[in-house]
Amino acid sequence: MKNIKYILSLIAITSFVACNDIEDVDLDLEETTVTPELTGGSVDFSNYVALGASFTAGFTDNALFKAGQENSFPNLLAQKFALLGGGEFTQPLMNDNIGGLILGGNLVINTEGDTLFKPRLVFGGEGPVDLKELIGDVTPTTDFLLNNPSGTFKNLGVPGAKSFHLLANGYGNIANFPTAANPYAIRLMADSPDASLLELAMAQNPTFFTLSEIGGNDVLGYATTGGDGTNTITDVSTFNFAFNTLITTLTSNGAKGAVTNVPYITDLPHFTTVPYNPLDPANEDFGPQIPTLNTIYGAINQIFIALGQENRVIEFSETAASAVVIHDETLADLSLQIIGALNASETFPIFVQQFGLPAQAAPLVANLLGNAYGQVRQATAEDLLVLPSSSTIGTVNMDALAGFMQQGLTLELAGQFSVEGISLPLEDKWVLLPSEQEEIKVATDAYNQTIADVVNANSNVALVDLNSVLSEAATTGLDTGGFSFTTNLVTGGLVSLDGIHLTSRGYAVMANEFLEQIDASFGSNFILSGNENIPADYPTNYSPALQ
């Protein structure tokens, strides 16, 4: 169902009038601002190396592509550092602006048959769409088996890398793919596939470094999979060891650097765009089904009420938007109670017959309902639905359809019981429950405490409070560079079409945050000397025609 729509700073000049005892004199004074000469303070910017994950790489719109990489925040920083003698900043550029990766000429497919490393997202008029929807079929040309770049790269940002991956030998060895290697690491480590990213950084003997978003992917994978257990949160002790090792090693030769902390990722539009109650009774595919749905759920609701589980009652409104139905693993499983109660009901066989089934099918339907609705409820405002759920809600789950038909239901009836978020509860992977959100926050707070402690103990390291920056954008709006940035999808200007990574304009803002903290910590004056980045010079999204 297409029922989700994506939603989207005068300087006062004071004139001075002076007077004396003889006469009033109007003084036409022209204010002048003296811009100081740029200085690097105590920092040697001659050899800058950036280490990090997707933000460092310039990942945007759900892909890595040349234009995005050229506007990565480390590349923007390097352009400013060049004014103070900074050297060439090399990046492992992709082959095209399509985005996505192939392996040996072939698309990489996961076990569910989905294409991995897809081309970038573009704006389709109402919201993000796949590039192919606007320009037709496109195939990436960046092959991480056949055409990897060689050489030494200053940008060592690897999308998807967790904290401990930066220490892992062989993370860039294709022989370890897919279990223990990352294709983006494979591309930039072609000459040293068994080295670690940290070793590659140290081999260049950096005089200055940035270490960004370390810890972000340690919770992000858990969040984007709805906390379903397929991608776990990195335990705090593992993160602590990794981060301490990274900082101790990077500063061991006297280099200075700047690091970020971890934002509350659940503030990002990937988790805040899809409403918990997107089911519109005016929708022609949903509205007419409401009476039948309420009849089916009515039989289950009576059992919920009898068991004192009123919070599980499911009912769809015919006049207002309704919440989706979700599976909640934290609930007690009432499957057996539901099955037992339905089988014991003298009227249940009659109930079953209204769906065109014989009375003898009552035990089958009882088992179906019990197993389907033992741990379900309607979503609340405290639940967060991940962005991809918007294209799933209201569609028929073909696996469920086939399963119900194998149990003896007709195609029509099986289809009625297989509608995602309506008759079929949304799986855990589509929803972050409050308990799962709390797990993410606890881990993020622990990571950030470690980061703060390490920075406070090392005068060679500056801290960029990325958490506060994104929190400000998510709440009051971030006023900078002539814009008021928010975290709204599409219209906010800061976060790209994937709802997680920044726009190129957002990366310009991020680069300025680094410059500000470098100035404050090491005595440089990038901002005061007028050498910050101008956000308006960078796009919020790219044309579909950009290839």
Image (cartoon, rainbow, N blue to C red):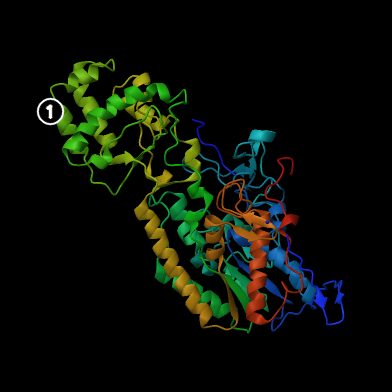
The total number of labels drawn is: 1
Residue shown at the point (61%, 68%) measured from the top left: 51
Disc 1: CA contacts within 10 A as few (<14), some (14-19) or many (>=20)? few
Judge from the rendering whether residue 525 lies leftward or rightward of residue 349; answer left or right: right
Residue 291: quadrant of the picture: top left
Query: In this rendering, does residue 531 appear at all?
Result: yes
Image coordinates for residue 522, horizontal then vertical, percent: 66, 81
**Near-viewer residue (56 or 541):** 541
Q: Is 410 above or below relative to 156?
A: above
Image coordinates for residue 370, horizontal then vertical, percent: 23, 34
Inspect the image, locate mark 1, and give the three-letter code of the amino acid beneath it. Answer: Ala
Q: Is 63 above or below relative to 405?
A: below
Image coordinates for residue 207, horizontal then vertical, percent: 68, 79
Residue 494: quadrant of the picture: bottom right
Query: In this rendering, does residue 151 appear at all?
Result: no
Q: Secondary structure at mark 1?
A: helix
View extreme (front): residue: 22
Residue shown at the point (41%, 68%) measured from the top left: 236
What residue sits right under mark 1 in the picture?
Answer: 344
Residue 460: quadrant of the picture: bottom right
Residue shown at the point (38%, 52%) measured from the top left: 229
Quadrant in which the C terminus appears: top right
**Near-viewer residue (90 or 535):** 535
Image coordinates for residue 403, horizontal then vertical, percent: 34, 29
